[in-house]
Image: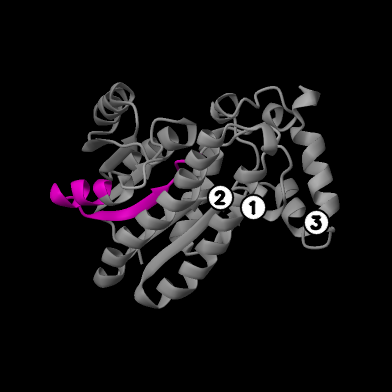
Amino acid sequence: MIAETGAVLITGATGGLGREFAAQYAAEGRDVVLVARSVAALDALAGEVRERFGVEASCFSCDLSETSAPRTLYEDVIGTGIQVEILVNNAGFAVDAPFAESDPVRQRGLVEVNIAALTELSRLFGADMAARGHGGILNVASVAAFMPGAYMATYYASKAYVLSFTHAVHAELRSRGVHVSALCPGPVDTPFWERADAGATLLARIGVPPARIVSAGRAALRRNASQRVCGIAWKATAFAMRLVPRGLAAEVAAHLQNPAAK
C-alpha cells in the first residue's frame, strides 16, 4: 500500500513531466522532494509549489549522469530526516542521431541516467519501503520500450530495460507492500524533444499534454498496476509489437525518427 503521509521524490523535477508530477502530488497535500541539475530552476519550482499548495518542497541539485550521484542523493535525503513514500524516476533523455556517428559522452550519460541511476535509486529507496511495508516506485518508461528504435537506438533500448526491470521488481515487492509501476506514454508535449535534437521529427509533433500522462501514472501506481500504456492508439501499438517482426518495427521507427526527415 501507499501511506497517506510521506514525501514524493521526483527526479528530473524541473522538466515537463517532472513539474506536473510535483504539482499534482503537491495538490494532494504531499511534501515533494525535487531533484534536478539546475539550482536556479529547482529554487524557482520549489517557491512556486510552496506558494500554490502550501506544502514543503525540498531541493537537491544532482547530476544523475555521475556514477556516484544516486548514492549521494539518497544519503543527502535520508540525512535530512525526509521519509520518501513515493519515488518517481522521471529523469531521462534521448539522443536523436545515427548511432555510429553520435556523441559517445552523451550516449554514456544516457545510460547512466536512464538505466543506472533509476536502478540504484529504486534499490536504495525500495529497500527502505520494503522494510516499512509500504511505499511506491513509479518508473517513467515509454511506448519506445516495446520496439527497437533506429536513430534513437540507445534511448529505446533504455526504456525496454526500464519496463522489464519494473515488471521484475513489481513481482518481488508486491508481497512486501510496495507498489511498483511503469508509465509508458507515447510522445508528450514537453521540451524533451528539443533536448534530444528531435524537435522536427514526426513523433515530436503529436505530443499530448503532460497532465494527462501524469494523472494516468499516478492512478496506475495507486492500483499497483505493473504498467500503464497511455492512449488507445499507443496501447494498440504496444500490443501489435508482439506480433510484428522486430526488423519491420525497427524500419517503422527509422521512418519516424530519421533525421533526414526533419
Three-letter amino acid code of the residue under disc 1: Ala
Return the mark for residue 112: none
Q: Are marks 1 and 3 in contact (CB under 8 Å)?
A: no
Q: How is the image coloured?
A: one colour
Three-letter amino acid code of the residue under disc 2: Ala
From the viewer's perspective, tell me whether residue 14 is left or right of residue 30: right
Q: Nearer the viewer, residue 144 or 101?
A: 101
Q: Say if 73 sits above or below 37 in the image.
A: below
The residue singled out by tag 1 in the image is 145
- Percent x, y for residue 199? 65, 23
The residue singled out by tag 2 in the image is 141
Q: Are marks 2 and 1 in contact (CB under 8 Å)?
A: yes
- Percent x, y for residue 121? 35, 54
Three-letter amino acid code of the residue under disc 3: Arg
Is residue 110 visible to us here?
Answer: yes
Q: Nearer the viewer, residue 96 or 237?
A: 96
From the viewer's perspective, tell me whether residue 80 is left or right of residue 131: left
Q: Quadrant of residue 13?
A: top left
What element does badge 3 sit on? Answer: helix
Q: What residue appears at the point 26 percent right and 53 percent down from the top-left corner?
A: 84
Find the distance from the CA under tag 2 to the CA under tag 1.
7 Å
Q: Nearer the viewer, residue 183 or 73?
A: 73
What element does badge 2 sit on? Answer: loop
Q: Earlier in the sequence, mark 1 or mark 3?
A: 1
Q: Residues within 10 Å of mark 3 (few under 14, many from 20)?
A: some
Q: What residue appears at the point 22 percent right and 37 percent down from the top-left corner?
A: 58
Q: Say if 35 sits above or below 196 in the image.
A: below
The residue singled out by tag 3 in the image is 246
